[in-house]
Amino acid sequence: MRFTYRWLAVGPIACFSAFASAQVAFGDFGAANSGFDYDTGDGWNVTGANSGSLPAPIRTAQQFTSSASGVVADVILPLSLYSGTSDILQVQLVNDNAGSVGGTVLETWTMAPTGPFNSWSTPKTLMGDGSASLSAASSYWLIASVLNDQSSNLYAAWNFNNTGVVGPVAQYFSGGWYYYPAPQTLAAFEVDVTPAPEPVTSIGLGLGAVALLRRRR
């Protein structure tokens, strides 16, 4: 009976780990390059005020609808360097406000450009800190900007996806957000979430603990 009791205690834990693994809530990368392929020669502008782009600075936002509920595990995206110095870029996950970019920041990351424009580079994986959660069938926005965009000369590109995925896009200029009314080619990115364990899993853990205590007694 010793083997049976130990299996009852450990088995539900293994089941819990399976439920806790991350799953893709949204992703539009191509299959090449180990499943992280994108358009290396085109993308949405992300610039500082001294980048030479007109208008400037430019922040770019991409809307996506989550296919799963859970805590944000990571965000994966390419932000390639077109010109200027390699300043720090900022990525923010915000809420959707009736189809527009919302004002509630769910999580913020910083990163350096992933590589030169017109050349494939490994996308950056930004790990979640557990503070942001997504709900299935709800929409959100990812915003890419230059951290100090009022003084930077960084000219970056958030590369397009090459799988034909389109959706709402917005760009921020000095006058505020400008929304493109027709669906546009979305930038390449992936958002992964860690789903919460189902109630039966938690019950299983409790039963396992009880079995272990009985065996010890």
Image: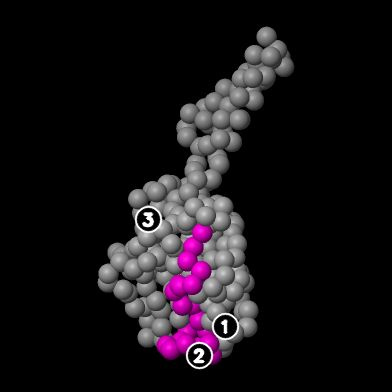
Q: Are marks 1 and 3 in contact (CB under 8 Å)?
A: no
| Closest to the observer, 148 or 42 | 42
The region drawn magenta spans: 37-57
Amino acid, disc 3: Thr
The residue at which mark 3 appears reads as 65
The residue at which mark 2 appears reads as 52
Q: Are marks 1 and 2 in contact (CB under 8 Å)?
A: yes
Is label 1 in a helix, a strand or a loop? strand
Q: Is residue 215 visible in the rendered structure shown here? A: yes
Nearer the N terminus, badge 1 or badge 3?
3
Amino acid, disc 1: Ser
**Residue at the limit of the structure toward the top, as seen here:** 1
Q: Is residue 205 visible in the rendered structure shown here? A: no
Decide whether residue 131 is among the magenta residues: no
Nearer the N terminus, badge 3 or badge 2?
2
> Of the numbered discs in the image, which one, if any, rests on residue 83?
1
| Closest to the observer, 56 or 29 | 29
User: In the rendered view, does 144 fall on the left or right side of 178?
Assistant: right
Amino acid, disc 2: Gly
Nearer the N terminus, badge 1 or badge 2?
2
| Closest to the observer, 103 or 111 | 111
